[in-house]
Image: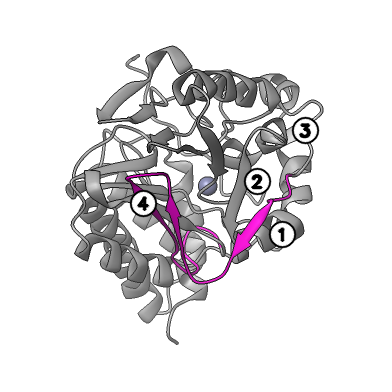
Amino acid sequence: MTDEPMTNEPVTNEPMTDAPLTDPAVQVGGAQEIAPDLLVIPNHRVALVPNIGIIGGTEAVLVVETGIGNTNAEQVLAFASEVAKGRRMYLTTTHFHPEHAFGAQVFAGQATYLVNRAQADDLKTKGPGYLEMFRGFGGSIARRLDGVKVPTPDVTYDDGYDLDLGGRTVRLRPTGRGHTKGDQVVEVPDAGVLFTGDLAETGQFAIFPWFPPYDTDVSGVRWLEVMDRLAATGPRVVVPGHGDLGGPEVLAGVRDYLRELREETWRRRDSAMGEAKIVAEVRALLIERHPEWVGQEWIERGVGCLCTEHPA
Ligand SMILES: [Zn+2]
């Protein structure tokens, strides 16, 4: 870290102007067994690398997330195949965003790719635009998206899916709109483990993919409702979409932040303050309250989203 003062980036409608320059490489060598036959490949806090899960039963293995692009996915598949030792393989993704799902084509013929219907719809309707947008970031991100096609799931379910891996049943549950329209969480009840996807991140401000007019699906209000429900389930271990693993306090932390973001935004909106001023004030306030968090660029997107959700 340097002593350089923080600069305030200008408010802009360009998607993700702070796109990271670090190559978003999944490091399968760092896999950790967090419960019997349940591995997590941690993202080591590298942006655009998700936490990836490999959950085993006696008959089958479920992989959660692919990493961005085919090379990452090939490494995840090779590692998962080693773990599976001939067991049948499944793949699921928590939502359609490129670092979570845009490697799934590599699993074709090797694993059954299973997702909730709303996520399948997101892949179909939003996937091509996101592929284009992420390629536009250039550098290592564009290279990793070389040859990538928006994936098509093999199996789509509606209300929930209990996947029997043999002696272990994993619960796939759509949460309803939150971080995206098609978010899904993955619960491993016998181990008390919950994979949240980007409904929860640690060490950073919550990711609001609020890119009007292209994508306005994220809902701060509904996301908060989802976090209230998830927090009530009391998991032992929470695997966030990005950042360090933790316990139930991870869910409470995100919920509290979303509440704080909503309250601070709406209080100013109540007094008819303009959006630019709200962004500036809320941004300064939240950075002061969470100085150690990265991803400050997501605050203004969160404020923008919540301004439109203000009950005027
Ligand atoms: Zn995401």
Q: State the SS at label 2.
A: loop
The circle drawn on residue 148 is 3
Q: Nearer the viewer, mark 3 or mark 2?
A: 3
Task: Classify 10 Å Cα crowding around label 1: few (below 14), some (14-19), many (20 and above).
Answer: few
The reply, left or right, for residue 217 in relation to residue 144 is left
- Label 2 belongs to which residue? 15
Q: Which mark is residue 262?
A: none
Q: Which amino acid, mark 1?
A: Tyr
- Left/right placement of residue 185 relative to residue 168 reads right
Indicate which label's residue lies in the foreground, 1 or 4.
4
The answer to whether the residue labelled 2 contacts the one labelled 4, judged by CB atoms less than 8 Å apart, is no
Disc 1 designates what residue? 214
Q: Earlier in the sequence, mark 3 or mark 4?
A: 3
Q: CA distance from mark 2 to mark 4?
A: 39 Å
In the image, residue 209 sits, relative to residue 107, either above or below, namely: below
User: What is the x, y in percent for residue 287?
Assistant: 31, 43
Q: Residue drawn 62% across and 31% down?
A: 68
How far apart, in angstroms, are the residues tagged by discs 1 and 4? Answer: 38 Å
- Left or right? Give the position of 230 relative to 149: left
Q: Nearer the viewer, mark 3 or mark 4?
A: 4
Q: Which residue is mark 4?
A: 169
Question: In the rendered image of this protein, does residue 268 appear above or below residue 227?
Answer: below
Q: Is residue 40 magenta?
A: no
Who comes first in sequence, dot 3 or dot 2?
Answer: 2
